[in-house]
Image: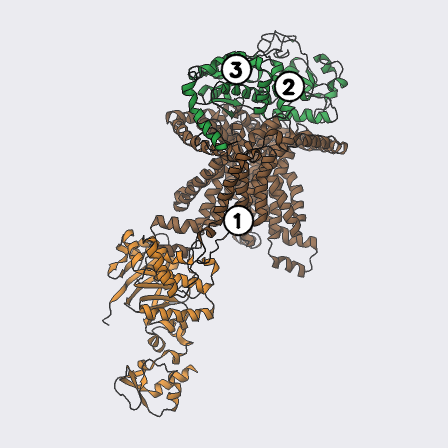
Chain colours: A brown, B orange, C green
């Protein structure tokens, strides 16, 4: 009998699905019971929070381990030796870009020469518009009086980005070639991608000396993961016939890799390069905490002396640099080789190179005679810092602005955020874990649920439970708000191509704009409160939600919407019954990214003033507390990974079920 | 046959799966393709024995998934065979070291691929010169040779183009030129014209016959198109489920299909176009009067067969009568076709 | 200007001091700069003094707490501003581990405490007395604090014990910790717009004095042991029941190896001493005049030769 009924059920809904939701409800029920007991005062304290005495001293253990590796195994000696090599490279670029007094003693290159070369390369890659963008970025930087600091930044990126490229490429090749390496690298990459950047920074300082070297190392490590992934992907996608053709041409293994695989994976590898560049730029401000000179350090100094206008200008420079490098590298990705007719003279074939050299030499010589071509001093520049200050302050002082923000602040803080935080904190630890497991189970199934249990269990054992819950609370609040704003925005924008493009451009800009700059206006509008924290995360978390909503809706196969039209669906029906369900898996990817971004930003929000993991992490930066720093970082990573695994599992399953491509 | 054997394939097996070697050892004889699949393995090549002689053009044909591409990849050791032996010019392929294998490919073998397998970042000339570059020929010499081959396949003037800038037919010409650059003795062609439009395909086949007329290489040609096979082949091997069903001359395959599968395969074929007078010539009765050419197909002789009153028509090869053709039998073939 | 010639000369010069001048090493003296203007300018002032003596100098941006570890290891050579209140603990910790030492005090004194901008006095005229402040606590109330006043303390890791003081003195205030100095300025900046009364953590010397005139709240005067012995101070049962010392030290710190490697520069370092007005002037050049730190340092040196030339001779 029992067999028959379950068989019947299998016909309507899949049995796995059914039992999943059943189990999830059971877990939910237990959690509710535990919480109720707690409220009734019936739950013993030891079940509410893990007693201090039972918390293993992870940080101390890690410290012992780190010290062993650092001193006894001689890792520090090794890294300090590497540091010297790195420093040598950094000195060369530093000399060239901003004239640091080091070998080869020929810099700094005049700003006009850099701008000129950027224009030529831009023209080669994308015509006049790109030339204008390339030259314009550097001219802006010089005129606004940020040339030297921008070049300090560039001199480090010029070392960090190629390093990340080569290491990523190498590891990518190994991961593609040896399944064992791949298996080993995958989980490390996942953790790396969710680990808060502060956790990279401290070891970087300890092992690679404070200053540009540590900055370069932290930047490199941060930028490696996508390069590995793209390399592996690209190599896997090389058509088998091309490989066989290589084999039949008598390639040795090395020749095959060098002449067949790598060139054929060009597109993916270049996409990897693009991502490396973008991630390097994303680290410009963060690495300033460990002594990376340049735009980031200046931005922090400006913020520390309340110069909104100058901070804003630095932000614009970073965005411009990011947009320029992004556009140029993307143009390079899609650029296909074009042949020259036979008999084309040598100079014609290398016209771009020759032009670059020509422009470069011209401006280098010109700079000897015309001082402004070489550099623009502080008093000659066009910075409008003070004017922007007045503008921002004036805007914030407007009565309507004040009243609106006061109202929002009051409602959000007093009625929503603070009660929500207190509620989350009032849930007993076991009940909280059960809730998360139930969520993972109902959405992702057994495996994510097990991970959720292990991961959150570890967080509970770390001894930082309350701070973890507060971190999570900020993330949940911000992402919920981002959903409420970002998704409708995406849906509206997706209606027309023009608006999609505009909103996507806004998303790009919002994402590259250094997140720190959001903090000050947020504080000025909403005070040092939870609202500011949530608002600054919100801006960041909305970007992927909006982007993927637009993308999801616009990639719904046209036959489907046409079929809906022919079935006489209204616009609303079409949206609710056809487009949204089909776009949902893609939107889930956006949702997942929003959560990841929120976990990233919540750490930065510690600069407003929070009581979460970010605050503790920030505090460890000042010391040498590697163990504690690592434990805190892993707590953030584990929570982020739980959501990542669950949501991505759901999205993949859902896509498969709907027969959509990945 | 006195001709020298170039490729000799004896009881070759290629099985895909978790541990094919072990499976093959423990496998009872006489298992069918489906039996093997039920065990979780795929028999890509199933107990194939076949010889290719010098200067011969062997066409391997079959539907997709029949194992023809796998077999040719075993000949070139792009796949390692699971069992049996394959020797090329007397060398046992599986016993070659990697270095020897590379030497063999660099000097003796050329291969053309269905989707061309060109390197997208190299120009026509660089693609063609690629095998020469791999074997370390100096820049000047390989450029000379590449230009020569590019001219041979009729791509003169396109040397500096990138594959992306060429039509499908032109791309395959590059593929052919590349495979010929090292002057291989053995030439593998894996469905070289399948990806092309019918008109271009026809043109390329003519081109191919012209080249083969000049070069006289030992060729293993793969196709799923019977017409193509009939146009080109000295011998045809028909494959199904990894095994060779029949390997014979086109006439014999059409006239005497060895298995039901082959018969079905050849059913739709216009036999009058395939069967040549030489095959129908019987030794005993020579017949009288004007002989017909042995290489003429029944279709070519249609008018004569209908109008001529002789019962037996003499058949001549290089002006020497080799036998007599029974007119009734020939008519039968002609009529059956229409 | 001929860049290449300059570069060449610089290259030659880099090796020249070794033979020409004293016995100072030609390796660059590494001076750390942090993220507040007075320290950056002062570091550049000192750097330019060293350069005028023929030394090579380099600046690195570092965290103001982590810097002591770097000085200890010799990664950076010295530190110009060691604040008693803010960095005393990190400095002492590094001192115990060894590798760096105290290179003397500035004349300047430092003070860190509760502070309010001048406009606050309009709403609470009894200031700067702390009792008066407590009486108008309601004036400082925000949406989140109900009818209690809000005091904005420095970041938790600065360990300013605002919470303890509120409890010890029984004040009607809620303590909220800002996450960074920038957050403090943002709050004052926002309050400035509608002249809202605020009381926040602040310190001197600091650029904020030039931007927003204000005063420190006068708490019961600091007595030694106030932070260790409950009996000290007005509340016999609590620690932290007095204000912070009004004259904290401002030290210089040096890497132990500096004395041997750059004896000339080290000698000057120990003599250097700035006063509060001098430091305020340096900060003003950057914060108000908006000069770049290097230019501000050059300008200051030019304007005050009598101050510094004594140190080098």
The quarter of the picture where residue C34 lies is top right
A529 sits left or right of A291 in the view: right
| Secondary structure state at the residue bearing disc 1 | helix
Q: CA distance from mark 2 to mark 1?
A: 54 Å
Between label 2 and label 1, give the one nearer the viewer.
Answer: 1
**Which residue carries the number 2 mark?**
C202
**Which residue carries the number 1 mark?**
A124
**Residue B194 higher or lower than A85, as above or below:** below
Residue located at (63% from left, 24% from top)? C287
Chain designation of label 3: C
Q: Are marks 3 and 2 on the same chain?
A: yes
Which of B229/C2 is in front?
C2
> Are there few (<14), some (14-19), or many (20+) residues within 10 Å of tag 3?
many
**Residue B25 higher or lower than A373, as above or below:** below
| Secondary structure state at the residue bearing disc 2 | strand
Image disc number at residue C252 = 3
| Secondary structure state at the residue bearing disc 3 | strand
Q: CA distance from mark 3 to mark 1?
A: 54 Å
Name the spot of residue B268 as percent of width and height, x first: 43, 76
């Amino acid at each position: 009998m029992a067999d028959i009924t379950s068989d019947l059920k299998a016909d309507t809904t899949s049995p796995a699905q059914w039992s999943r939701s059943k189990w999830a409800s059971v877990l939910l029920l237990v959690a509710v019971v535990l919480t109720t007991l707690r409220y009734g005062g019936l739950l013993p304290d030891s079940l509410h929070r893990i007693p201090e005495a039972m918390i293993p001293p992870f940080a101390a253990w890690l410290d012992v381990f780190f010290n062993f590796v650092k001193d006894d195994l001689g890792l520090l000696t090794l890294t300090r030796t590497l540091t010297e090599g790195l420093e040598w490279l950094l000195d060369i670029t530093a000399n060239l870009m901003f004239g640091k007094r080091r070998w080869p003693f020929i810099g700094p290159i005049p700003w006009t020469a850099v701008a000129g070369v950027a224009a030529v390369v831009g023209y080669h890659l994308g015509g006049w518009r790109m030339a204008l963008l390339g030259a314009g970025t550097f001219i802006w930087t010089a005129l606004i009086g940020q040339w030297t600091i921008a070049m300090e930044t560039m001199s480090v990126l010029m070392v960090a980005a190629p390093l990340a490229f080569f290491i990523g490429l190498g590891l990518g090749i190994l991961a593609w070639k040896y399944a064992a390496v791949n298996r080993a690298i995958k989980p490390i990459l996942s953790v790396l991608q969710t680990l808060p950047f502060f956790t990279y920074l401290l070891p970087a300082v300890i092992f690679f000396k404070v200053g540009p070297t540590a900055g370069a190392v932290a930047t490199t490590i941060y930028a490696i993961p996508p390069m590995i992934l793209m390399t592996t992907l690209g190599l896997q996608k090389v058509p088998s016939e091309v490989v066989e053709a290589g084999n039949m041409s008598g390639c040795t293994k090395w020749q095959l890799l060098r002449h067949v695989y790598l060139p054929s994976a060009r597109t993916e590898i270049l996409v990897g390069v693009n991502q490396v560049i973008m991630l390097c730029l994303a680290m410009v401000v963060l690495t300033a905490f460990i002594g990376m000179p340049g735009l980031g350090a200046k931005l922090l100094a400006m913020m520390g002396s309340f110069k909104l206008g100058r901070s804003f200008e630095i932000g614009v420079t970073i965005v411009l640099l990011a947009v320029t490098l992004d556009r140029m590298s993307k143009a390079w990705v899609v650029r296909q080789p074009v042949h020259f007719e036979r008999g084309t003279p040598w100079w014609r074939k290398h016209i771009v190179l020759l032009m670059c050299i020509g422009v470069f030499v011209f401006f280098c010589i010109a700079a000897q005679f015309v001082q402004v071509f070489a550099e623009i001093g502080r008093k000659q520049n066009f910075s409008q810092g003070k004017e922007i200050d007045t503008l921002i302050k004036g805007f914030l002082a407007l009565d309507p602005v004040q009243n609106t923000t006061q109202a929002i602040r009051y409602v959000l803080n007093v009625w929503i955020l603070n009660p929500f935080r207190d509620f989350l904190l009032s849930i007993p630890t076991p009940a909280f874990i059960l809730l998360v497991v139930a969520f993972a189970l109902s959405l992702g199934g057994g495996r994510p649920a097990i991970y959720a249990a292990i991961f959150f269990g570890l967080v509970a054992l770390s001894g930082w439970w309350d701070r973890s819950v507060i971190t999570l609370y900020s993330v949940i609040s911000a992402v919920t708000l981002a959903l409420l704003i970002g998704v409708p925005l995406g849906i509206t924008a997706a209606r027309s191509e023009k608006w999609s493009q505009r909103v996507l451009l806004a998303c790009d800009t919002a994402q590259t704009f250094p997140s720190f700059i959001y903090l000050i206006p947020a504080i000025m509008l909403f005070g040092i409160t939870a609202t500011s924290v949530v608002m600054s995360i919100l801006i960041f978390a909305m970007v992927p939600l909006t982007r993927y909503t637009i993308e999801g809706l616009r990639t719904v196969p046209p036959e489907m919407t046409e079929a809906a039209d022919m079935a006489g669906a209204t616009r609303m029906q079409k949206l609710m019954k056809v487009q949204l369900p089909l776009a949902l898996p893609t939107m889930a990817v956006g949702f997942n990214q929003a959560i990841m971004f929120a976990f990233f930003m919540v750490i930065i929000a510690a600069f407003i003033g929070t009581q979460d993991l970010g605050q503790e992490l920030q505090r460890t930066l000042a010391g040498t507390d590697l163990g504690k720093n690592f434990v805190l970082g892993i707590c953030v990573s584990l929570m982020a990974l739980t959501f990542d695994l669950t949501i991505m599992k759901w999205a993949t399953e859902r896509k498969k079920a709907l027969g959509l491509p990945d | 046959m006195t001709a020298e054997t170039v490729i000799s394939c004896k009881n070759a097996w290629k099985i895909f799966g978790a541990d094919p070697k072990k499976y093959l050892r423990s496998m009872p004889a006489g298992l069918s393709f489906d039996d093997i699949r039920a065990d979780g393995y795929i028999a890509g090549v199933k107990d194939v024995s076949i010889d290719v002689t010098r200067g011969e053009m062997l066409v391997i044909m079959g539907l997709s998934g029949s194992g023809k591409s796998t077999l040719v990849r075993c000949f070139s050791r792009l796949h390692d065979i699971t069992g049996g032996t394959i020797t090329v010019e007397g060398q046992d392929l599986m016993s070659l070291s990697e270095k020897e294998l590379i030497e063999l490919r660099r000097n003796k073998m050329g291969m053309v691929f269905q989707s061309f397998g060109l390197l997208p970042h190299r120009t026509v000339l660089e693609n063609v010169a690629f095998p020469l570059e791999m074997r370390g020929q100096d820049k000047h010499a390989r450029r000379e040779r590449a230009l020569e081959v590019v001219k041979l396949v009729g791509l003169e003037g396109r040397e500096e183009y990138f594959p992306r800038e060429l039509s499908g037919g032109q791309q395959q010409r590059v593929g052919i030129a590349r495979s010929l650059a090292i002057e291989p003795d053995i030439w593998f062609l894996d469905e070289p014209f399948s990806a092309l439009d019918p008109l271009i395909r026809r043109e390329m086949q003519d081109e191919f016959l012209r080249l083969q007329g000049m070069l006289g290489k030992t060729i293993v040609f793969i196709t799923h198109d019977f017409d193509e096979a009939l146009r080109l082949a000295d011998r045809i091997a028909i494959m199904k489920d990894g095994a060779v069903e029949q390997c014979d001359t086109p006439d014999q395959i059409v006239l005497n299909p060895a298995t039901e599968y082959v018969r079905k395969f050849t059913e739709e074929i216009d036999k009058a176009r395939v069967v040549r007078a030489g095959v129908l010539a019987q030794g005993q009765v020579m017949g009288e009067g004007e002989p017909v050419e042995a290489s003429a197909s029944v279709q070519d002789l249609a008018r004569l067969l209908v109008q001529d009153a002789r019962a037996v028509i003499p058949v001549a090869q290089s002006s020497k009568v080799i036998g007599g053709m029974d007119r009734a039998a020939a008519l039968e073939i002609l009529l059956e076709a229409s | 200007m001929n860049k290449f010639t300059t570069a060449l000369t610089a290259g030659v010069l880099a090796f020249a001091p070794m033979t020409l001048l004293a016995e100072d090493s030609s390796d660059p003296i590494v001076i750390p700069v942090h993220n507040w203007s007075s320290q950056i300018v002062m570091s550049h002032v000192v750097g330019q003094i060293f350069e005028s003596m023929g030394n090579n100098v380099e600046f690195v941006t570092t965290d103001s707490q982590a810097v002591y570890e770097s000085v200890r290891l010799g990664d950076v050579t010295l530190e110009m501003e060691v604040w008693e209140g803010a960095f005393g603990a990190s400095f002492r910790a590094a001192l115990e581990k060894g590798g760096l030492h105290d290179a003397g005090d500035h004349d300047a004194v430092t003070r860190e405490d509760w502070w309010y901008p001048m406009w606050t006095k309009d709403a609470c005229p009894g200031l700067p007395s702390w009792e008066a402040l407590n009486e108008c606590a309601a004036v400082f109330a925000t949406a989140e604090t109900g009818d209690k006043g809000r005091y904005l303390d420095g970041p938790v890791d600065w360990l300013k014990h605002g919470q303890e003081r509120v409890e010890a003195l029984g004040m009607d205030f809620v303590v909220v910790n800002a996450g960074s100095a920038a957050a403090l300025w943002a709050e004052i900046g926002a309050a400035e717009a509608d002249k809202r009364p605020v009381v926040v953590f602040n310190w001197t010397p600091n650029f904020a004095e030039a931007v927003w005139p204000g005063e420190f709240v006068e708490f019961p005067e600091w007595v030694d042991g106030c932070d260790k012995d409950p009996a000290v101070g007005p509340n016999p049962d609590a620690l932290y029941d007095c204000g912070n010392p009004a004259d904290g030290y401002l030290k210089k710190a040096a890497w132990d190896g500096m004395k041997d490697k750059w004896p000339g520069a080290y000698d000057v370092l120990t003599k250097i001493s700035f006063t509060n007005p001098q430091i305020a002037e340096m900060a003003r050049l950057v914060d108000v005049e908006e000069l770049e730190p290097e230019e501000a340092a050059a300008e200051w040196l030019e304007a005050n030769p009598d101050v510094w030339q004594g140190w080098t001779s």
